Image (cartoon, grey):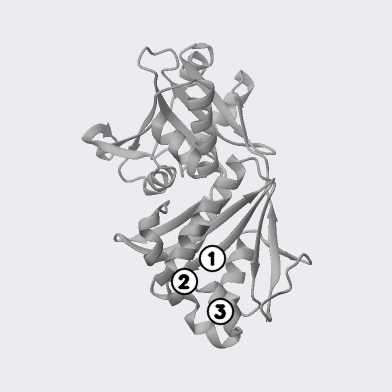
Amino acid sequence: MKIRRATAADAEAIALVLSRAFCEYESSHTPEAFAAMILTPHEINERMNDGPTWVALEIGVIVGAVSLVLKNEEVYIRSMAVSPSARGKGIGRKLLDRTEAFAISNRCKRLCLSTTPFLSRAINLYERFGFRRNHEGPANLFGTPLFTMSKSLEALELRKTEERDLDYVLAVEHGDENRLFVIPWSREQHLQALVDPDVAHLIVNAETKVGYVILAGLLGPNQSIELRRIVISEKGKGYGSAAVEIIKDLVFKTYQAHRLWLDVKMQNQRARGIYEAADFVTEGTLRECLHTENGFDSLVIMSMLRQEYDESKTRE
């Protein structure tokens, strides 16, 4: 399953997903409300002008979608749907992860949506994701009852790693969920990175430390910066996706790089999905180039160019 930004060419497929997802609830809506939920391809394209849309693909077929509107410090979620044939596979959760990452990277303080009381499957998903009902409007859509749900967001930032952070850094990269996907460093290697002018060693901070990042090649003549490492300790909260967006801003705005690149183990599907959703392009594979205790691993090379970053910001 893959998450990526939608384009105008996806409008018909998104319209089909909406129709399939909501057709079983048609009798619970007024005709006008149901028509407002089942959008035409033209209406979907118009929504893409208001904010980003992401789609979920399974074997190359679009099976889920979500559209967003950014207003001040809030992201409003609309037209989120998953095809009935693709339910139960975590697609809705992944779309919400991508939504939250977008909101955090844009320094938003809240996610918000409106839903009907009979969409129990969707409501359960929203509640598990941290949404709570409130008394804000609207109360109905063309005569069909609605209620609003929202989720407060923690601000995410990158700060320079200090020597006192290294116990945390070492513990995180040696954790069971991370050590299979990174090559652990010694304390001395991390200490050297802290004072290397060509390297940025950074803590990912919410209310507490939630991960760390290492960028390399800051002084290189080719203006190509490597995302050498990103390790998140708090899984399933959208921090990884949000941190990648903040890293992109740092690399292209602050460091004025031309290229941001990384390598990721082929079997690290979670990380590859995050990078693909963040518009990184796969350049190729270094086959079985890394000797590990379990044999040989392949590395996938992915990158983003400044032009691609600028275009993605324009779409937002």
Against 9, residue 252 (above or below) is above
Mark on residue 181? none
Mark on residue 79? 1
Name the amino acid type tagged 2: Leu
**Answer yes or no: do the residues labelled 2 and 3 have beta carbons within 8 Å?**
no
Residue placed farthest to the right in the image? 135
Name the amino acid type tagged 3: Phe
State how far apart marks 2 and 1 are (Cα): 7 Å
Which sits earlier in the primary sequence, circle 2 or circle 1? 2
Against 234, residue 219 (above or below) is above
Mark on residue 18? 2
Q: Say few, some or many: other residues with alpha carbon within 10 Å of mark 2 (under 14 / 14 to 19 / 20 or more).
A: many
Q: Determine which residue is flagged by label 3.
A: 34
State how far apart marks 3 and 1 are (Cα): 12 Å
107 left or right of 90 in image: right
Q: Can residue 291 be seen?
A: yes
Label total for image: 3
Against 24, residue 235 (above or below) is above
Which sits earlier in the primary sequence, circle 3 or circle 1? 3
> Which is nearer the eye, 37 or 43?
43
Which residue is found at the position 59% from the left and 23% from the top? 161
- Whole-percent x, y for residue 255 in the image: 50, 20
Q: Quadrant of residue 272?
A: top left
83 left or right of 122 in image: left
Q: Quadrant of residue 1?
A: bottom left
**Answer yes or no: do the residues labelled 2 and 1 have beta carbons within 8 Å?**
yes
Where disc 1 sits, the SS reads strand
Which sits earlier in the primary sequence, circle 2 or circle 3? 2
- Whole-percent x, y for residue 129 in the image: 61, 59
